[in-house]
Image (cartoon, rainbow, N blue to C red):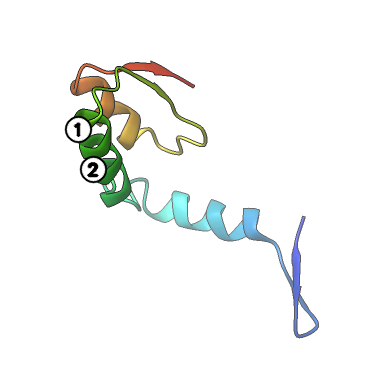
């Protein structure tokens, strides 16, 4: 699948394949800022369970697991 932009078809899967081949930890190993923000909100509201969709490399899932939350994906 691709996206048309000014007459050029960009195939995103090819772009991501190149990125992952050259840098396996492109996004880093630390949890994302969004995961930290969500965790603080969950902690404030005494949440115990998380449904994580689109986990990518799993760095956020790893973090949430370390924080003792029950995970589903």
Q: Which residue is depicted at the point 25% across and 29% down?
A: 45
Give the side of residue 5 with respect to residue 34, left or right: right
Distance between mark 2 and mark 1 Cα atoms:
12 Å
Please provide percent x and percent y for residue 2.
75, 61
Please provide percent x and percent y for residue 17.
55, 51
Question: Is 7 in front, or is 51?
Answer: 51
Please provide percent x and percent y for residue 47.
29, 22
Give the side of residue 5 with respect to residue 14, left or right: right
Q: Quadrant of residue 5?
A: bottom right
| Residue designated by label 2 | 36
Q: Which mark is residue 44?
A: 1
From this view, report whether residue 3 is shown above or below residue 8.
above
How crowded pointer 2 is (Cα within 10 Å; few <14, some 14-19, many 20+) is rated as: some
For marks 2 and 1, the one nearer the N-term is 2
How crowded pointer 1 is (Cα within 10 Å; few <14, some 14-19, many 20+) is rated as: few
Q: Which residue is depicted at the point 36% across and 53% down?
A: 23
């Amino acid at each position: 699948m691709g996206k048309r932009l000014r007459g050029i078809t960009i195939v995103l899967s090819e772009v991501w394949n190149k990125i992952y081949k050259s840098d396996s930890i492109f996004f880093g190993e630390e949890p994302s800022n969004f995961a930290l923000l969500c965790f603080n909100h969950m902690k404030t509201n005494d949440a115990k369970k998380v449904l994580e969709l689109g986990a990518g490399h799993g760095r956020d899932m790893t973090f949430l697991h370390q924080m003792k939350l029950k995970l589903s994906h």
